[in-house]
Image (cartoon, rainbow, N blue to C red):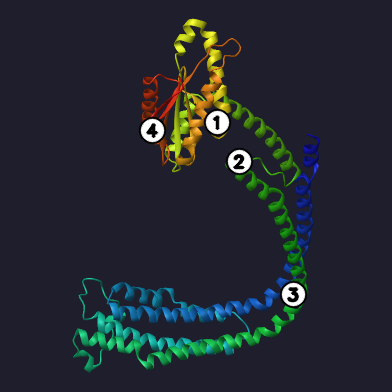
């Protein structure tokens, strides 16, 4: 118990670990708050330098997205002829107007004329493409049933070339697809991208100086933040390791031990050590009680050998085994006469004596059980050829010992039936041994008989 208390006293407490974690987190929190405040101050200065660039960049992207969206919807329509793509096209062109909004947004900034010119060129090229796109969609749309979806006025206003007027539906669809997938169309799209990129480069040049100045001021603060995060990583790693070592690992070990019905391994924080030691003490007590109860439930209270229930359990287990075994059914000859002549108390003493003789005659690993009033069984596992002479010798030895009266008990004898099985306990084995026992009794008792040879050995 003293050693157990010493084991419990070892290790760090969870409460102490908790205090360390709280203190470390508080210090780290103060450091990060200060670093964040410094970053906010410096960042506000950088915002002024980058705000114009961000807004202008959005304008460039907005124009490109609008142009690409129009191209996508026009192509989808001339390929699939589904009205929803044409409707989406004119919604973007006449309602959403991302391209026009890009130019409007750029006009709010000073010193942006050069950038504005590039964006204006991109819009002009995009407008050229819209003419081609509207013409291509009109070629397809005006060949279809207008009752399905009313055509936009812009589609109706398109004047076809004389050569296109003569085309059938298939020819118009092919012509429309060629218009929006031609190399000239792609070249114009490339020019839009080029103008947009020139616009972005102009914005970059304009804001680069202001950004550089603000970036230098932020560099020092960022370095401090890196240091803070490094400290945070180290503290987090240490905390994680401590939690794994002192809490999680012991808990997982406890769960495994409980599932496997074993003692808990003492480890981890001091509280877990105390818990493990207490559990182990209760576990040992429960196991001892369980062993006592199991032993009591399996033992015959009079003779101290296994009872019939324990024999049936052993029989069930051996039915699944494959090794050879022998079953002996042992009956006390004329036991009823002993009870009638000497009384039941003497009869009980006789049964105890018989049980003691059987237990002392056979090995500790052999199963000895009382299955009836004066009937016992012995199960021996081993090679059948070698076990036969052993059984003969032991059967003779038991009858010789019981033939000598002791403590006023009468002279008694045993009849023994033996059956052998090459592969575990079969369903027929008990009947075979009982039949061999019947033969012994039929030939005068006090002897043994093997079922397989049918020869009885009598001692009377």
Q: Nearer the viewer, residue 286 or 278?
A: 286
Which image quarter holds the N terminus?
A: top right
- Between disc 2 and disc 1, the foreground one is 1
* Displayed quadrant of residue 260: top right
Indicate which disc, 4 or 1, sits on the residue closer to the N terminus. 1
Proximity of marks 2 and 4: CB atoms separated by less than 8 Å: no
Element type at marker 2? Answer: helix
Q: Position of residue 220 (x, y in %)?
A: 78, 74
Asked whether, in this view, residue 26 is left or right of residue 124, the answer is: right
Mark 3 to mark 2 CA distance (whole Å): 57 Å
Residue that label 2 marks: 258
Asked whether, in this view, residue 26 is left or right of residue 256, the answer is: right
Residue that label 1 marks: 362
Q: How many marks?
A: 4
Residue that label 3 marks: 218
Proximity of marks 3 and 2: CB atoms separated by less than 8 Å: no
Is the residue marked by circle 1 packed among few (<14), some (14-19), or many (20+) residues within 10 Å?
A: some
Q: Which mark is on residue 427?
A: none
Is the residue marked by circle 2 packed among few (<14), some (14-19), or many (20+) residues within 10 Å?
A: few
Q: Position of residue 450 (x, y in %)?
A: 40, 31
Mark 3 to mark 4 CA distance (whole Å): 92 Å
Is residue 288 something one can see in this rendering?
A: yes
Element type at marker 4? Answer: helix
Residue that label 4 marks: 429
Q: Nearer the viewer, residue 105 or 236?
A: 236
Mark 4 to mark 1 CA distance (whole Å): 20 Å
Indicate which disc, 2 or 1, sits on the residue closer to the N terminus. 2
Proximity of marks 3 and 4: CB atoms separated by less than 8 Å: no
Residue occupying image coordinates x 75% and y 79%: 216
Residue occupying image coordinates x 20% and y 89%: 167
Element type at marker 1? Answer: loop
Q: Position of residue 49 (x, y in %)?
A: 68, 78
């Amino acid at each position: 118990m003293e050693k157990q208390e010493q084991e419990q006293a070892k290790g760090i407490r969870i409460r102490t670990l908790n205090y360390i974690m709280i203190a470390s987190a508080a210090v780290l929190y103060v450091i990060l708050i200060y670093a964040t405040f410094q970053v906010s101050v410096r960042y506000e200065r950088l915002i002024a330098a980058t705000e114009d660039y961000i807004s202008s960049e959005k304008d460039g992207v907005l124009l490109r997205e609008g142009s690409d969206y129009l191209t996508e919807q026009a192509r989808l329509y001339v390929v699939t002829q589904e009205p929803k793509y044409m409707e989406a096209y004119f919604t973007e062109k006449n309602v959403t107007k991302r391209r026009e909004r890009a130019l409007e947004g750029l006009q709010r900034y000073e010193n942006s004329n050069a950038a504005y010119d590039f964006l204006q060129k991109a819009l002009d090229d995009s407008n050229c493409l819209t003419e081609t796109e509207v013409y291509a969609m009109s070629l397809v749309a005006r060949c279809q049933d207008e009752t399905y979806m009313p055509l936009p006025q812009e589609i109706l206003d398109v004047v076809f070339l004389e050569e296109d007027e003569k085309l059938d539906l298939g020819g118009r669809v092919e012509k429309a697809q060629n218009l929006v997938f031609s190399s000239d169309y792609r070249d114009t799209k490339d020019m839009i991208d080029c103008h947009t990129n020139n616009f972005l480069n102009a914005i970059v040049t304009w804001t680069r100086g202001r950004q550089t100045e603000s970036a230098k001021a932020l560099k020092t603060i960022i370095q401090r933040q890196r240091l803070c995060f490094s400290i945070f990583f180290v503290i987090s790693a240490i905390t994680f390791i401590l939690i794994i070592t002192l809490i999680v690992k012991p808990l997982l070990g406890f769960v495994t031990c409980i599932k496997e019905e074993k003692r808990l391994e003492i480890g981890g924080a001091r509280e877990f050590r105390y818990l493990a030691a207490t559990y182990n003490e209760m576990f040992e007590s429960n196991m001892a009680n369980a062993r006592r109860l199991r032993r009591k439930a399996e033992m015959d209270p009079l003779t101290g050998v296994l009872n019939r229930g324990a024999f049936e359990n052993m029989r069930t287990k051996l039915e699944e085994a494959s090794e050879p075994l022998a079953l002996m059914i042992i009956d006390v000859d004329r036991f009823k006469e002993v009870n009638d002549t000497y009384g039941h108390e003497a009869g009980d003493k006789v049964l105890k004596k018989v049980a003691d003789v059987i237990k002392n005659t056979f090995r500790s690993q052999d199963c000895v059980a009382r299955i009836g009033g004066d009937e016992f069984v012995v199960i021996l596992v081993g090679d059948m050829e070698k076990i036969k002479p052993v059984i003969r010798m032991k059967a003779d030895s038991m009858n010789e010992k019981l033939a000598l009266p002791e403590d006023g008990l009468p002279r008694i004898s045993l009849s023994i039936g033996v059956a052998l099985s090459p592969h575990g306990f079969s369903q027929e084995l008990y009947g075979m041994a009982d039949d061999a026992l019947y033969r012994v009794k039929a030939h005068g008792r006090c002897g043994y008989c093997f079922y397989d040879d049918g020869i009885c050995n009598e001692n009377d």
